[in-house]
Amino acid sequence: MAGRLIEVVVDCHDPERLAAFWSEVLGWKVIDRDGGTVEIGSWEPTVEEFRARQMAPTVLFIPVPEGKTVKNRLHLDVSPVEGSTEDEVTRLLALGATRVQEEQPANQSWVVLRDPEDNEFCVLRTLDR
């Protein structure tokens, strides 16, 4: 029997703020708040669904006192469902993301951004192409 990936945990200073940002990025909603943590997802997990099949993981934001000090060892990749990659980057910048590099290398098909707590993530090419 194999395990199931059910959530990705993000350490942060402000779980509410980061959950709000990522909810907007992904079009997800807050599905739980408990003891300072905030969980977002595209679905509300049930024991029955968890046992029946692999579902998309949720993202759990937990408060920690220390700040980020080095490059992420794990990061999220997102891809626009509609519109171009640059349209999606523009939308995410308006939500509070920042660019890691102003100059995009010509041969690089993704854009590296940071969320409001400086966690790197990538915007990949559109799924339409």
Image: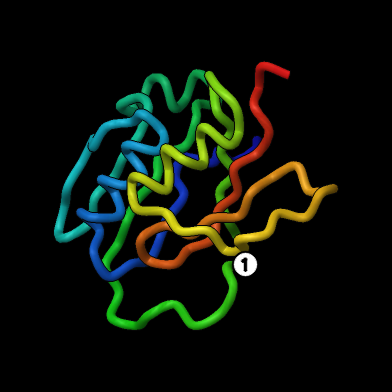
Q: Rate crowding at label 1 as few (under 14), some (14 to 19) or many (20 or more) other CA atoms within 10 Å.
A: few
Up/down of 105 relative to 21, above or below: below
Quadrant of the frame with the C terminus: top right
Q: Residue at x 34, y 83 (%)?
A: 66
Q: Looking at the picture, tell me which residue is in the foreground, 36 or 88.
A: 88
Determine the image quadrant of residue 63.
bottom left
Up/down of 52 relative to 57, above or below: above
Regarding mark 1 in the picture, which secondary structure is present there? Answer: loop
Disc 1 designates what residue? Answer: 73
**What is the image's colouring?**
rainbow
Q: Is residue 74 left or right of residue 63?
A: right
Up/down of 58 relative to 120, above or below: above
* Amino acid at dot 1: Arg
Please give the count of numbered marks on the rendered protein: 1
Q: Looking at the picture, tell me which residue is in the foreground, 4 or 113.
A: 113
Quadrant of the frame with the N terminus: top right
Up/down of 90 relative to 104, above or below: above
Q: Residue at x 62, y 63 (%)?
A: 101
Q: Is residue 90 left or right of residue 126?
A: left
Q: Residue at x 49, y 83 (%)?
A: 69
Q: Position of residue 47 (x, y in %)?
A: 35, 27
Q: Looking at the picture, tell me which residue is in the foreground, 49 or 128.
A: 128
Q: Residue furthest right?
A: 107
Q: Is residue 90 left or right of residue 103?
A: left
Q: Is residue 30 left or right of residue 104?
A: left
Q: Position of residue 126 (x, y in %)?
A: 64, 27
